[in-house]
Image (spheres, rainbow, N blue to C red):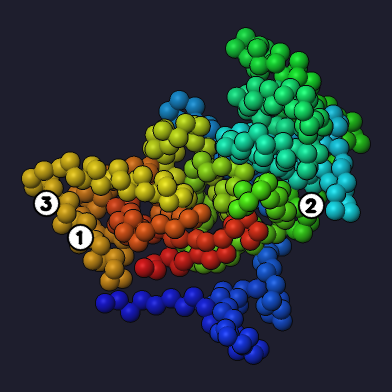
């Protein structure tokens, strides 16, 4: 058996045990916490002085301005916006929000807030709006597609936000919701502006009914391009950034909780930043670089996807968005060819089932070869001899790797448990590690992540 060993923690013997409990367990990565005199608090470790999205974005604008950042699938290729282009668009969007008074201040918890709601499938416009909000120290409020009417109305009422940035498919849902709510509790009465991502929403005949529906419900409708153009033409007084600090809230992350209404978690810049940086520490030589890319398809409202976005920003990596159709995810990946794949057990179980079904359909010598290849690689894996095999990979697994684009070098799973059978099988089939994380919105996504190479 392998003598491979991972130390996931040490006992804190500097203080007495609480009766009936062991000493507290401290991560071995605690040596990377800047303030070694205070291990009682979770603290973000700065990434060369950077602990906000604003600072990380402009670090990349300064060092890699023309490298690709956000990619959108168009036909059989991905088209990219560079770091500088994204910064320019989000900056002008922020000026437009300010000049059009789309994010007025509201009072809450003894201080003033400004909120921007976003509801859409993952796409470049979501993050242009999110980064635009960051430019003005505005907190975003992400709305899941699966949120019901009652939960949405609760969030509208609690935040008192006035503006939603959305895809066109959301327009009718919000218009109908507002119209129904006006005759009842009027929890949506403050929501008066829609920023629609589609640039032709107000001119394309296909959207005419939705536009009329929104306007008749009481919304003022803007296209995203209009807000960006308003920012370009804004007065000098409106062309200023309000740079956030690490402790500023950049998102209210609403979680379902266990009972009652959604719970709004105040996510500060330095929380997912600390998680992303700590994950890089944990990944060691497998950490993200400027040469890496990942496919963005997990909900952008979720802290897992937010942490991945921030991981890409601090690392200078590329983000390619899926086409919006979950059934075409693997088709998107075949075109994008990402090097990093992050998902949840439900998707990994589907991949596991698809590969198993394909293998089970083989007969004769091919079936015998597949069984020998899987059994052998699982033995090597469980005895600490890695994920690759020169012969079996060439004969079998390099073709399986193409399912995720062919270049994935590291995978991660989170959000719920996944069986060791699925983990090990996918490691040998995709020929790379699959690490597992556990965490919550309150901890900036991952609280714990396994070491690469762990079993």
At label 3, counting other C-alpha atoms closer than 10 Å, the crowd grade (few under 14, some 14-19, many 20 or more) is few
The residue most toward the top is: 205
Residue 192 horizontal/vertical position (percent) = 80, 27
Task: Kindly report which numbered mark, 3 or 2, lies closer to the viewer in this rendering.
Answer: 3
Image vertical order of residue 38 relative to residue 76, above or below: below
Classify residue 91 by image quadrant: top right
Q: Please name the residue that numbered disc 1 is placed on.
A: 375
Please rate how many residues cluster around mark 2, counting C-alpha atoms within 10 Å: few if below 14, some from 14 to 19, many from 20: many
Classify residue 149 by image quadrant. top right
Q: Earlier in the sequence, mark 1 or mark 2?
A: 2
x 62%, y 73%: residue: 32
Residue at position x 30%, y 76% from top? 2
Mark 3 or mark 2: whose residue is earlier in sequence: 2
Residue 151 seen in the figure: yes
Categorize mark 1 by other alpha carbons within 10 Å: few (<14), some (14-19), many (20+). some
Q: Earlier in the sequence, mark 1 or mark 3?
A: 3
400 and 423: which one is in front? Answer: 423
**Residue shown at the point (66%, 48%) measured from the top left:** 260
Residue at the far right in the pictured view: 237
Indicate which disc residue 244 carries.
2
Mark 3 element type: helix
Q: Residue 28's x, y, as percent?
A: 54, 77
Residue for badge 3? 368
Q: Is residue 16 left or right of residue 220?
A: left
Q: Is residue 364 above or below residue 119?
A: below
Tell me the residue at 8%/47% (across/down): 365
Q: Is residue 252 left or right of residue 68?
A: right
Dot 2 falls on a residue whose secondary structure is loop
Q: Which part of the image, by quadrant, shows the C terminus?
A: bottom left
Label 1 secondary element: helix
């Amino acid at each position: 058996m392998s003598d491979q060993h991972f130390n996931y923690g040490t006992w804190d013997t500097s203080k007495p045990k609480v009766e009936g409990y062991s000493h507290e367990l401290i991560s071995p990565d605690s040596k990377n916490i800047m303030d070694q005199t205070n291990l009682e608090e979770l603290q973000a470790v700065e990434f060369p002085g950077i602990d906000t999205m604003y600072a990380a974005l402009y670090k990349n604008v300064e060092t890699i301005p023309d490298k690709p950042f956000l990619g959108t699938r168009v036909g059989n290729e991905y088209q990219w916006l560079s770091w500088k282009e994204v910064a320019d668009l989000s900056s002008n969007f922020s000026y437009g929000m300010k000049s059009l008074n789309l994010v007025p201040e509201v009072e809450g918890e003894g201080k003033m807030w400004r909120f921007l709601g976003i509801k859409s499938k993952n796409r470049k416009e979501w993050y242009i709006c999110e980064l635009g909000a960051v430019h003005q120290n505005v907190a975003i409020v992400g709305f899941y597609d699966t949120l019901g009417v009652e939960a949405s109305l609760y969030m509208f009422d609690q935040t008192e936000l006035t503006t939603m940035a959305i895809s066109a498919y959301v327009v009718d849902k919000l218009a109908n919701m507002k119209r129904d709510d006006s005759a009842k509790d009027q929890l949506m009465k403050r929501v008066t502006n829609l920023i629609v991502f589609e640039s032709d929403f107000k001119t394309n005949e296909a959207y005419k009914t939705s536009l009329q529906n929104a306007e008749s419900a009481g919304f003022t409708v803007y296209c995203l391009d209009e807000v960006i153009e308003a920012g370009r033409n804004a007065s000098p007084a409106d062309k200023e950034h309000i740079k956030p600090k690490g402790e500023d809230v950049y998102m209210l992350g609403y979680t379902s909780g266990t009972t009652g209404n959604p719970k709004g978690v105040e996510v500060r810049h330095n929380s997912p930043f600390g998680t992303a940086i700590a994950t890089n520490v944990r990944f060691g030589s497998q950490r993200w670089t400027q040469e890496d890319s990942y496919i963005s398809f997990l909900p952008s409202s979720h802290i897992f996807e937010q942490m991945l976005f921030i991981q890409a920003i601090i690392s200078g990596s590329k983000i390619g968005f899926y086409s919006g159709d979950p059934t075409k995810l693997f088709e998107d990946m075949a075109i994008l060819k990402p090097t990093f794949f992050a998902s949840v057990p439900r998707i990994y179980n589907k991949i596991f089932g698809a590969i198993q079904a394909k293998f089970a359909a083989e007969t004769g010598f091919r079936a015998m070869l597949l069984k020998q290849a899987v059994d052998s690689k699982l033995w090597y894996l469980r005895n600490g001899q890695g994920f690759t095999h020169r012969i079996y990979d060439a004969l079998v697994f390099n073709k399986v790797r193409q399912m995720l684009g062919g270049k994935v070098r590291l995978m991660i799973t989170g959000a719920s448990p996944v069986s060791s059978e699925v983990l090990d099988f996918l490691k040998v089939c995709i020929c790379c590690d699959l690490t597992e994380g556990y965490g919550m919105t309150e901890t900036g996504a991952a609280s714990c992540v396994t070491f690469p190479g762990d079993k």
